[in-house]
Amino acid sequence: MTQKAEVTPGAAWPALPARAMALVYLVACLLPIGIGALSRAAPLDPWEAFGAGLGLAGLTAMAVQVLTSGRFRAVSGGMGIDRVMAFHKIAAYVVVLMLVLHPLAYVWPTWLDDPARGSERLVAYLTGPDWRSGVIALGALVLLVVMGVARDVFRYEIWRGSHVILALVALGGGLHHAASAGRLSALGALHGFWWAVGAVIVLAFAVLYGWRWLRLHRQPWELRSVEPKADRVWELDIQPAEGTAPVVYRAGQFVWMTVAGRRFPLFDHPFSIADSPRRAGLSLIIKEAGDFTSTVGDLRPGTAIGIDGPYGTFTLERHSGDHVLLVAGGVGIAPIMGLLRDLVARGNTRPVRLAYAVGQPENFACLDEIEAARAVLDLDVLLISESGEGWDGATGYLDRAKLEAILGGLAPERGVALMCGPGPMVTKVSDTLEDMGMPWRNVVYERFDYAGGLSARQDRRRTLGFVGVFAALAGLVAALSQIVL
Ligand SMILES: Cc1cc2nc3c(=O)[nH]c(=O)nc-3n(C[C@H](O)[C@H](O)[C@H](O)COP(=O)(O)OP(=O)(O)OC[C@H]3O[C@@H](n4cnc5c(N)ncnc54)[C@H](O)[C@@H]3O)c2cc1C
């Protein structure tokens, strides 16, 4: 019999499962069309109704983007941050498409009759004072998406700051446009709906950048020690300062961290907790990757640290299996150490297998501790260095032969795998484990890169699910706008 998922201290944030979230999303986006039916405005012709439907649903979907930004646990807690961010990105394209089509649908019949007059009408919409806030909103939205695509061109903090400002301009302009220029929204219930949406957005930003900023200062943490763990890899021991409430988390989750005077949510960075909830405080294993991470080795004990979390669903509690396969690539060892330390702390009796791959042997971290864990757990370890120089262990990539070797006689179909590492490795190993018979729902991974790619089978399944939601949204907007507007 397959062993049940275990329970450790650390409450999981209550959250809806993915299907329920999809339903809530559709209902939320379609709600203004339903409310629009109550309006006493004169009936619209079919194209105008479609244009209005696109505007109403598109603006609401844009507002929902604030909540799917990965920073609200009630939203990302049930789906996982990888999925929420993937949804957020695809939804951004859908919102742009709906809102670009919104004015075009109004002029389409005119354009079919007389292209010159259609173009004139469109220019009038784009330049007329009555529609200015809508045009500004659309411009900000398009820029937001273009900057999202070109994210790596910008310094992260600049990109993020401009993301927030452009989002506020797009939302503020869009709401002003709806409430002032929209025929259905000018008065009555729909007018009230936009005020309510505006209030939710203000509240969301107040929580994200006001209340959380206050909490980072009022509930500070303190750096106790910084230790080198491998080449350009550091382990930070962070403890709550006096009066600060501890973080209640599950092994494998992550936190957003800020340092000293820069304890403001705009400057935070995500790091996995490399610790067991059974130990006080938090340990983070951080690899130097850029501006911020290159400075962690110089941080002095006693430095004030801001911690916001926990986030993420990379935990054993959500998945059951007779045995556990842990796979780490490079600094992906951080959450894997969290899981391993917790399995040790809990006195886990399930067989545990660890495959840990790095580029060079000097990148291995925590090997002493991994070795010591063998004394407590039924643990086999496979260490792989991509480059063989100065290394007499396994070399190359973590391929099927190596996975079969580390699993030994353990049946893949009865196990659960948690892996964290670079995108290409995670993708390849995920597909290989599926080929070996592991149920895909038991192959759980986290990438440290939101732009991790689409190529694993799981990613493609997930994207197909999103496409289904957006196809349903498009179909329902088209149908409902004709029936009720
Ligand atoms: C869920 C999650 C958990 C992570 N856990 C760990 C961990 O345990 N250990 C570890 O060493 N690294 C971890 N990372 C990666 C870590 O957050 C980035 O390496 C770090 O933020 C880079 O910041 P920088 O200023 O040093 O580098 P930069 O030069 O600014 O950026 C290097 C790369 O990191 C990305 N990045 C920068 N800042 C952020 C940010 N605030 N949020 C998301 N991406 C960012 C950039 O887009 C770029 O691709 C994790 C990332 C995620 C998403």
Image: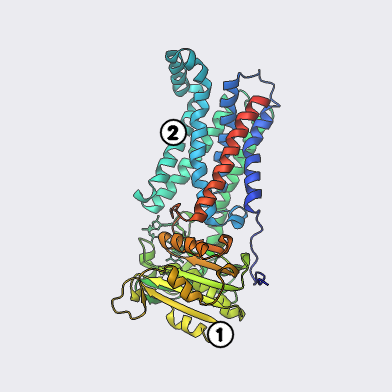
Secondary element under disc 2, as helix, strand or loop, is helix
Hey, what amino acid is under mark 2?
Gly
Who's the residue at 44% across and 41% down the image? Answer: 144
Please indicate, yes or no, whether residue 180 appears anywhere in the rendered image.
yes
**Mark 1 vs 2, N-terminal side:** 2
Tag 1: residue type?
Val
Spot occupied by residue 307 in the image (x, y as percentages of width and height)? 52, 64
Q: Which mark is residue 376?
A: 1
Q: Which residue shows up at 43% across the image and 53% down it?
A: 451
Question: Considering only vertical position in the picture, is 23 above or below 134?
Answer: below
Colouring of the image = rainbow
Instruction: Quote the CA–CA distance across marks 1 and 2.
Output: 59 Å
Q: Where on the image, by quarter, is ligand 1?
A: bottom left
Residue 194 position, x and y percent, is: 62, 34
Quarter of the image where the N terminus is located: bottom right
Q: Residue at x 55, y 45 (%)?
A: 466
Image side of residue 331 versus residue 407, left or right: left
Name the spot of residue 149 as percent of width and height, x first: 40, 45
Q: Residues within 10 Å of mark 2 (few under 14, many from 20)?
A: some
146 or 330: which is nearer to us?
A: 330
